[in-house]
Image: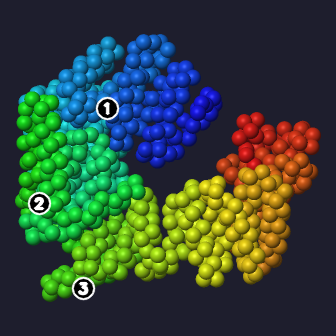
């Protein structure tokens, strides 16, 4: 399929809002191919530079090599065509290529050295500092076991001025700490790294916090290590790009005597191995996981059954601790052997073996929330439940301890401490499932989904709630009931066909239990979420059936009519859309008048304001439909009525008022009142582009 340039630019723009993943990668590659076919060289360059960043900061740096190489070759052929800004972007991105390329054993090591030489040549030619060059020479030297060279590059970099091509204030110390830890200089690593823990970029502060874990533990700073782990993991846990940092956090669990916590992380993140950004990251995660699993074997838990979440529609079969340890040990050593062949030494194999043999260092660091005496709001109840866990454990009441863990997780969530609730629920689930307490385990899974959502990790919350609803055919344990959870999942998904499907399913559940108002609300959301084209007719029919039910609240009926009208309008059924909107207007106009009369002697109620806001939206939509039906006078009447209802007329960002003004201007123009229309545009700061952008 071919595209025009305009279509291609829109397709490219649409990729900005897509989440990282296979669909976004494919869309960017499609834009590149068609840009090449149309001969849009500058556009193809810009797309590839953006794609290089997307690929590098996802888990497919191999794709970044290809897009970057194309851009570098194009620039070298015609530097004047792309300019100084393009050169700066290329010089910045070459650091990403060097950082990644040496982590692929299939790529000859000389390729990394050639890139470093090319980087230095280009930097010198442009009069730039050697700071970034020395940093990346040190990283490559450290990765192949040339530690004396790594130290030399580190010290030279430390004496070299920074400039605009140097990494940020968090990433430079992160690479320094990595080298210092390999050299055994822990105190210096902490001194260099700690100031960077407040830095932020796409890699920070999770990278620096993860690199500091081992020096913290080896120097007896257990509390600092625990805080760094928690801070790092909250930013790592939703993105496979951070697999290498996750490996460092797994090692922390082993070093501090928290193999159980490490197992939670393995069960959740093992599917990431299929998305490892580089073979080195894959080997490091596998080796760190082996250390965790070996610690559990030593505790007599080798036969413990592990279950893994589904990833991209597939789920890894259950396996035991011992079997998984053997599998990952072989995997890690195989990758390390490939690096040794490429590097000409056994540095990586020895390093990976040390990782797999890791054990506790110094005193254990209590990591479980059940070992903490909390003093924040809700602390008394939480402390009591923590003591109950300890007491039940001491008397051998494993089931009582597991239920107390679940109750503590609930208390933490009620106390608005979602991060701690996540940790408590994950620990409770492991115990409940081990004891075969299926009902309590499912209840805890529901709680965990809520905790993730409240802690700002919506993607993980969606994944967990979706799995529960697909697995459980009846109500989930606890309150609310299934239709409410389905509506909640639709809300968490926010937009798109899947969100619409869950809202539609919730509407059916509400209908079955006679909850008409909730049914109408769910159907309205299902229609507004951009349902799949094949689902629209069925949703509209379901909505008409719901609207025919007696006794439904006026606002619910009006809201659903409005949503139906939007679908009808989009489908070109303008007359039907106008009828629905007029009916909704009449319903709300009566309700608004009644509410105003009731509140005439007092301040306007929130309910009255909400009704007026919805009525304004409906009137604006009605004006737009009437305009398209060729009735500008009727459109003007509706637009003026909508404008009268909008609040805060001096707020330039009031979207409802802006929409009403735009459709009023277009109505005035349609009936020939251009002078009044131009004055209205001037009064509200509108231009022709604003009128063109409005889609009715």
Query: In this picture, is 95 found above or below 301?
Result: above
Q: Is residue 88 at least partly visible in the picture?
A: no
Q: Residues within 10 Å of mark 2 (few under 14, many from 20)?
A: many
Vertically, is 486 above or below 686?
below
N-terminal of the pair, mark 3 or mark 2, is: 2
Q: Quadrant of the N terminus?
A: top right
The kind of secondary structure element at disc 3 is helix
Distance (Cα) linking label 3 and label 2: 28 Å
Q: Residues within 10 Å of mark 1 (few under 14, many from 20)?
A: some
Task: Give the tally of numbered discs.
Answer: 3
Residue at numbered disc 2: 294
- Residue 681 at x, y = what percent? 80, 41
Identify whether 79 is placed above or below 239: above
Left or right of 535 in this view: 171 = left
**Closer-to-camera residue (445/593):** 445
Q: Tell me where residue 563 appears, x and y as whole percent.
A: 71, 62
Residue at x 34%, y 42% (from the top left corner): 59
Q: Quadrant of residue 672?
A: top right
Describe the element under mark 1 as helix, strand or loop.
helix
User: Which numbered marker is on residue 541?
Assistant: none
Q: Give the residue number, with chain letter if any, for mark 3.
A: 400
| Label 1 sits on residue | 96
């Amino acid at each position: 399929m071919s595209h025009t340039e305009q279509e291609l630019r829109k397709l490219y723009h649409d990729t900005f809002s897509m989440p990282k993943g296979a669909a976004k990668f494919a869309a960017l590659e499609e834009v590149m191919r068609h840009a090449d076919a149309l001969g849009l060289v500058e556009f193809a360059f810009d797309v590839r530079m953006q794609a290089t960043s997307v690929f590098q900061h996802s888990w497919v740096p191999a794709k970044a090599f290809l897009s970057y190489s194309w851009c570098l070759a194009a620039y070298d052929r015609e530097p004047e065509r792309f300019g100084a800004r393009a050169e700066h972007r290329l010089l910045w991105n070459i650091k990403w290529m060097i950082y990644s390329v040496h982590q692929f054993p299939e790529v000859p090591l000389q390729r990394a050295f050639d890139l470093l030489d090319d980087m230095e040549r280009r930097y010198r030619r442009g009069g730039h500092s050697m700071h970034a060059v020395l940093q990346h020479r040190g990283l490559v030297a450290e990765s192949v076991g040339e530690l004396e060279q790594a130290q030399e590059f580190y010290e030279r970099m430390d004496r070299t001025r920074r400039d605009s091509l140097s990494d940020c204030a968090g990433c430079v110390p992160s690479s320094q700490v990595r080298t210092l830890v390999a050299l055994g200089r822990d105190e210096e690593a902490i001194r260099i790294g700690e100031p960077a823990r407040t830095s932020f970029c796409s890699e920070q502060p999770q990278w620096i916090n993860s690199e500091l874990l081992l020096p913290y533990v080896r120097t007896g700073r257990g509390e600092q290590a625990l805080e760094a782990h928690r801070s790092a993991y909250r930013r790592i846990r939703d993105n496979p790009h951070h697999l290498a940092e996750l490996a460092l956090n797994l090692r922390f669990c082993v070093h501090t005597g928290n193999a159980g916590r490490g197992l939670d992380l393995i069960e959740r993140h093992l599917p990431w191995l299929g998305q490892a950004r580089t073979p080195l990251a894959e080997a490091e995660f596998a080796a760190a996981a082996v250390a965790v699993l070996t610690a559990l074997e030593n505790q007599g838990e080798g036969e413990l059954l592990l279950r893994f979440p589904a990833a991209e529609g597939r789920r890894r079969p259950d396996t035991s601790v011992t079997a998984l340890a053997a599998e990952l040990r072989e995997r890690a050593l195989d990758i390390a052997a490939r690096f040794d062949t490429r590097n000409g030494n056994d540095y990586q194999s020895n390093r990976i073996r040390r990782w797999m043999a890791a054990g506790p260092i110094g005193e254990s660091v209590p990591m479980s929330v059940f070992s903490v005496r909390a003093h924040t709001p809700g602390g008394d109840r939480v402390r009591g439940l923590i003591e109950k866990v300890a007491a039940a454990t001491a008397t051998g009441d494993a089931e009582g301890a597991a239920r107390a863990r679940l109750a503590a997780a609930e208390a933490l969530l009620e106390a608005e401490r979602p991060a701690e609730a996540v940790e408590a629920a994950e620990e409770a689930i492991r115990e409940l499932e081990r004891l075969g307490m299926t009902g309590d385990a499912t209840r805890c899974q529901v709680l965990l989904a809520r905790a993730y959502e409240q802690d700002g990790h919506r993607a993980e919350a969606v994944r967990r709630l979706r799995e529960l609803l697909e697995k459980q055919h009846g109500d989930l344990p606890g309150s609310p009931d299934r239709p409410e959870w389905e509506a909640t999942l639709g809300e968490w998904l926010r937009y798109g066909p899947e969100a619409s499907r869950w809202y539609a399913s919730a509407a059916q559940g509400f209908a079955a239990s006679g909850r008409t108002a909730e049914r109408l609300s769910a159907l309205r959301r299902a229609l507004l979420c951009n349902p799949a084209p094949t689902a629209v007719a069925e949703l509209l029919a379901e909505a008409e059936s719901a609207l025919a039910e007696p006794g439904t609240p006026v606002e619910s009926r009006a809201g659903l009519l409005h949503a139906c009208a939007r679908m009808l309008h989009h489908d070109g059924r303008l007359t039907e859309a106008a009828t629905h909107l007029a009916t909704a207007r009449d319903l709300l106009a009566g309700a608004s008048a009644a509410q105003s009369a009731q509140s005439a002697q007092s301040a306007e109620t929130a309910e009255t304001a909400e009704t007026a806001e919805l009525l304004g939206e409906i009137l604006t939509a009605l004006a737009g439909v009437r305009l398209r039906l060729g009735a500008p006078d009727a459109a003007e009447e509706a637009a003026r009525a909508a404008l009268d209802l909008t609040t805060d007329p001096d707020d330039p960002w009031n979207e409802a008022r802006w929409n009403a003004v735009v459709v009023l201007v277009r109505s005035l123009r349609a009936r020939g009142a251009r002078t009044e229309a131009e004055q209205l545009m001037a009064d509200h700061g509108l231009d022709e582009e604003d009128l063109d952008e409005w889609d009715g």
